[in-house]
Image (cartoon, grey):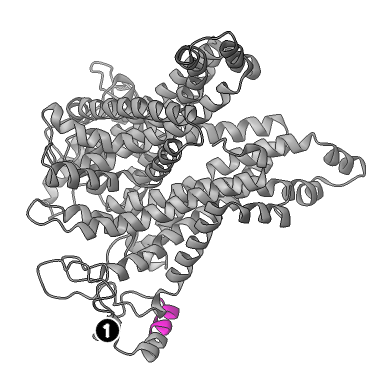
Amino acid sequence: MIPGGETWRRFRRDRAAWIAFLFLAVVLAGSLAAPLLPLPSPSAIALQDEPIPPVPPWKELVRPGFRADPWGLSALDLRLVSVRQSIFGELQTAPWLGTDAKGRDLLARVVWGSRTSILAALAAALASLAIGVAWGLGAGFAGRKVDEALMRTVDALQSLPFLFLVIFLIGIVNEYRSELEARGIGRETVFYLVLGAVAWLPMARMVRAQVLGLRRSAFVEAARVAGASTPRILAAHVLPNVLPVVLVALSLTIPTVMLYEAFLSFLGLGIEPPQVSWGILAADGTEAINPVRIAWWLVLAPALAMGSVLFALNVVGDGLRDAIDPRLRGRT
Amino acid sequence: MIRFLAGRCLGFALTLAAVVLVSFVLMRAVRGGPFDAERRLDPAIERNLRARYHLDWPVHLQLLQYVGPLNLDERGARFLGGDGSRVLGGVLAGDFGPSLRYRDQTVGDILAQSLPVSLALGCAALLWALTFGLLAGVVSAVRRGTRTDLALRFLATALVALPNFVVASALVILLAFLWPLLPVAGWGSWRHLVLPSLALGAPVGAHVARIARTGMLETLSQDFVRAARGKGMPERIVLLRHALPGALVPVASYLGPAAAGVLTGSLVIERIFAIPGAGSHFVNSALNRDYTLAMGVTIVYCVLVYALNTGVDVLHRVLDPRIARESA
């Protein structure tokens, strides 16, 4: 059951899942390498009053004019930007996806915005792995009373409209932002923590279900008879067999949390300008809709970015589920 | 069944108490009061305002005053209980206190105006979602493996993946600007309801379609369906009378999460379409530090979702008695 060579082969044979996987890898690479790419600065404002429609790359590939304004970048990113300047100099891509009403390049904003989504996904994954797996292991293995208590908590939390509580929490945390920033905890850190705090519930549930089954299995009994301690049984026998379920749970959680991020940023409760996120881009696009002039690219670009990545994640998740347990093929 | 319901109610009471307690203590512990937002008030006025909203009381008395129908006015605040001559409201009595931002309205007033709007929107969205979702799910299960199935599944996955505000902007561009059929935003007639409820119902409908397809495929492979076909029943009756009820069970159990999703989604949709519902009030109150309003909406929505979830579980047990036996 450990996702080894056989699972990987099955996954690669699933054409759609494999293409989606490659697509996600390209997106990830592009977003990590964003400072190295010859993109315009995502926050460089050009004085004008109209958004510029897209200029396709075959009409105009690059144009000069790159200015390295440090738009709140980390030290590493700044160094990468200087590397980029030594490679490409002043050159930057023409507005292939157009610009927004302030003249900021949309392609650059979409690429930089992907970093926010990836961080949100990372926060969700870490929280699921740290809290969710431990919670599920505890509930599944520690006996009936602990199980009851832990799972009732999960039930209770899951039965609440959680996003309301999250928004409420974010509103309250905002009151303390200057204190938190003085201690080096940025608003974004808090935001990612809150996202992580929502993300671990499905993981706990799925891991627990798997552990309950494993606990009664013959090889765990055998290990116990042979005198293995509980931590050893958990680490050496249970955990490796939980791994497939963990992967499946992650494939369900990550898209959800990326949606939450976009949702909250859209409402102005998540990432704030000058940082970019796909939610903010979508909000800008929605605001720019008016009957006089439809700046369709402002709506389409973030929608396509978000839609394609989430779609690919769903496809990869389905493929992963099928590859890990072929009996489930076509069930979801 | 009674034991199940009692357990559910107890669990809910505990959860809600925890939610109220934590959020209450958090929001009162916050340093910045709701009155120091724009310009400094005269100290005397601010003192009066704080006294009016009992912000000058110790936190535990504020909590009691907020939760229960107890008399804790100025005289009573000194010792718990007061003289009992006047009973103040409280959440348990259905009174969520005054709004801290709209000073002449109580949270109850605001909810009474905005909740029906949100519920109308939510019901319309659920109706769309169930109609289209079930139809798409059944068609795609019956036509399994054909192009229709593929297209419907692609559409469902795309709608699950896209956030509802993207769907909303697409609908507005298509059906309000390019082909001006429906109003862009606002509230008032049924025509204002169409676009927002479609956008709100889209992801839910997509989920319903996927669940219905799976359930339908499962029941179609069962022996009793084969038996019905073997007896020579018309395919329409096999599908509608024999297979569909089985496929409805998983859809019914999804209704609880669906309702929660619709309520949550309405936060964004109400904002896009400028609908004066509880969701937009909630977002504004979170941004404006209108704590009592934010808490009121949170509590009401928690109760709504919990009641729906419990109702769905009861329905589920009625539809499929095996579940009750398994968990007993």
User: In the image, A329: left or right of A166?
Assistant: right
B188 is higher (above) or lower (below) than A235: above
A255 is higher (above) or lower (below) than B81: below
- Mark 1 Cα shell of 10 Å, populated few (<14), some (14-19), many (≥20): some
How many numbered marks are there? 1
Residue A75 lies within the magenta run: yes
Residue under pointer 1: A66
Q: Nearer the viewer, residue A43 or A40?
A: A40
Task: Identify the chain of the residue marked 1, using the numbered disc in the image.
Answer: A
Magenta segment main secondary structure:
helix
Q: Position of residue B156 (x, y in %)?
A: 41, 39
Q: Is residue A175 visible?
A: no
Q: Quadrant of residue B172?
A: top left
Task: Magenta stretch: give its range.
Answer: A74-81
Q: Nearer the viewer, residue A312 or B146?
A: B146
The amino acid type found where label 1 is placed reads: Phe
